[in-house]
Structure formats: C-alpha cells, structure tokens
Image: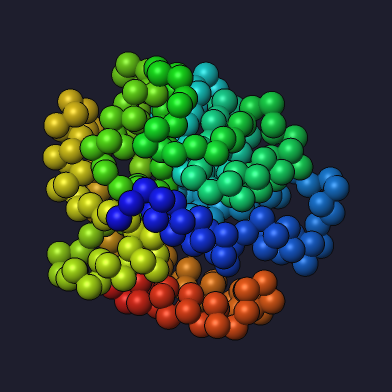
Amino acid sequence: MTQNTHLELVTEFYDTHPISERQVLDKLVQDGFDLSSLDQGILQDYDQDHFGGLAATDTLAHLANVGGSTHVLDVCCGLGGPARYFAHHYGSRVTGIDLNQSRVDGAIRLTEMVGLEGKVSFYHANALSSALPSAEFDSLIAQEAFCHIPNKPELLTECLRVLKPGGLIAFTDILEGASMTTPVTERLRQEMTFTELNTLDGYRELLEASNCRIEEIEDLSEEWAGILVNRLAMYRGLKDQTIARFGSSHFEKWDRTYSFFVGLYA
C-alpha cells in the first residue's frame, strides 16, 4: 500500500466518523450547556473519543509521569480530548499531532472554546515524519493510534527522536489476534484503517531492539471486550445524527464494519 493510499483511507475514515466536533457540540447543547461559557471541566466528559475514557487517559498519564513540568506529545490526538485533559488536570504543556486536518481544526476550536490555547497546541503532521524538534518532549502518549500507522520501526524511531533522553512513552493499541487470517486483516485495513497491527510480543521485541527499557506491559484484551461492545452500542445511539450527516448507506456500512471488528475481540 502506498503512502498516498494510506493517507486517503485514514482521512476518509475520520472525516466520516460518527464522533466529530459537531457531534460533541450538539450533545453539549442537547444536555443544556451554553457553548459561549463552556469550560474544560464540562467538555472533558464529552470529548474523550478513545477506548476507556478518562480512566484510561489517567492510567497513561501516571505511567508517563505526566505533571506540571512536563511537555507531552499526544500522537494521533484526534479532537484533542486527552491533550486538553493533561493541560487542565495535570498542568502540563501539550502538543498534539494528527494526520487528519479536520480533526486538528476541530481540536483547535474546542481548545479555544475552553481557553486552553496557551497550554495546548495542535499540528497537522505525520507521526512517521513530524518535523517536530528533536529531544523536545518529556512524555509521549498514544491511544489506539499505532494500529493506523505503517512501519512500526520507523514510527518508534521518530518517537524516540522527539523525546528527551530518559523520556517516557505510554500507549495503548489494537493488537493482532492469533487466529486472524489474511482476509480478516485486509478487511480491517480497508474498513477500519488498521494499516499494520502488531502483537504484544512484537511490540516487546521492537522496543527492546531500540534499547528501550520496558517498565510495564499488559494485555487488556479481556477488559477491552466489554468496552468494544459498549462502544458499538454508543455508535448505534448516534444513528440519526450519522444518517443526517452521511446518509443511511454510510451508517449501515459503518455498523457492519464495527460489528465485524467487535466480533473479533468480544
């Protein structure tokens, strides 16, 4: 697969994703909040578009020693929910990068709405070649992001380049199942943009080969099974909004795709 094809797949996937800046804001209005006086304490309960919500974000923050003196890089930051949370809750300075321009634009607007633009910055960038300064960050966070990125050795090399010596990486990711066949991984690549799935042992070997010291590694498959089932129910709860934005055929395709994905793990 060429880089352009990868870019096109990821861009389309997130441009037509059920969770969007508009969906977040519509839900806030529906729940009675005034967007002109929105604060981060409210927004953080609506903008966490990753598995596990704030609890998962807190876990990674503790593993990466996120605090008031740290500069954090959020790789594949999406709409910026975790980045804003790190800045607001931990006092960190945060930079987020994402391959999708509409996600970056939404992250910037939401951040300005809650007055955190002085502590959080977002950039449209490729995690494989970000052009960020070397040895800039104390901590690097990624949540279900690396599965969308090809060439894991190149990715890790770039992550280590931008980290300060002794910097910490904490991430969660979708893993390749032992029984997955080529047709299954190809469908996930095409429909979920899981460009290159790795295994737990694969990540361990990759990190060790790069002279990283592994402080903790955990298989969360059992815990995530329930999270995936709940996420599918949430997406189905957004049926009307998804159809209004993209049409019924898109919703039906998304539902088939996500049901297939959840069935592999749950």
Q: Nearer the viewer, residue 230 or 243?
A: 243
Q: Position of residue 259 (x, y in %)?
A: 40, 78
Q: Nearer the viewer, residue 145 or 13?
A: 13
Q: Position of residue 77 (x, y in %)?
A: 51, 43
Left or right, residue 98 beside residue 154: right
- Report the residue at 73% width, 58% height from top: 25
Q: Position of residue 149 (x, y in %)?
A: 35, 48
Evaluate whether residue 225 shows in this view.
no
Left or right, residue 167 beside residue 151: right
The image quadrant where one finds the C terminus is: bottom left
Q: Is residue 168 above or below residue 193?
A: above
Q: Quadrant of residue 64?
A: top left
Left or right, residue 161 beside residue 238: left
Evaluate whether residue 199 shows in this view.
yes
- Total marks shown come to 0
The image quadrant where one finds the N terminus is: bottom left
Q: Is residue 130 above or below residue 218?
A: above
- Report the residue at 23% width, 37% height from top: 153
Q: What color scheme is it?
A: rainbow
- Report the residue at 55% width, 39% height from top: 124
Q: Is residue 150 above or below residue 209?
A: below
Q: Quadrant of residue 105?
A: top right
Q: Quadrant of residue 225?
A: bottom left
Q: Nearer the viewer, residue 225 or 133?
A: 133
- Report the residue at 81% width, 57% height from top: 33
Q: Position of residue 109 (x, y in %)?
A: 71, 43
Q: Nearer the viewer, residue 5 or 189?
A: 5
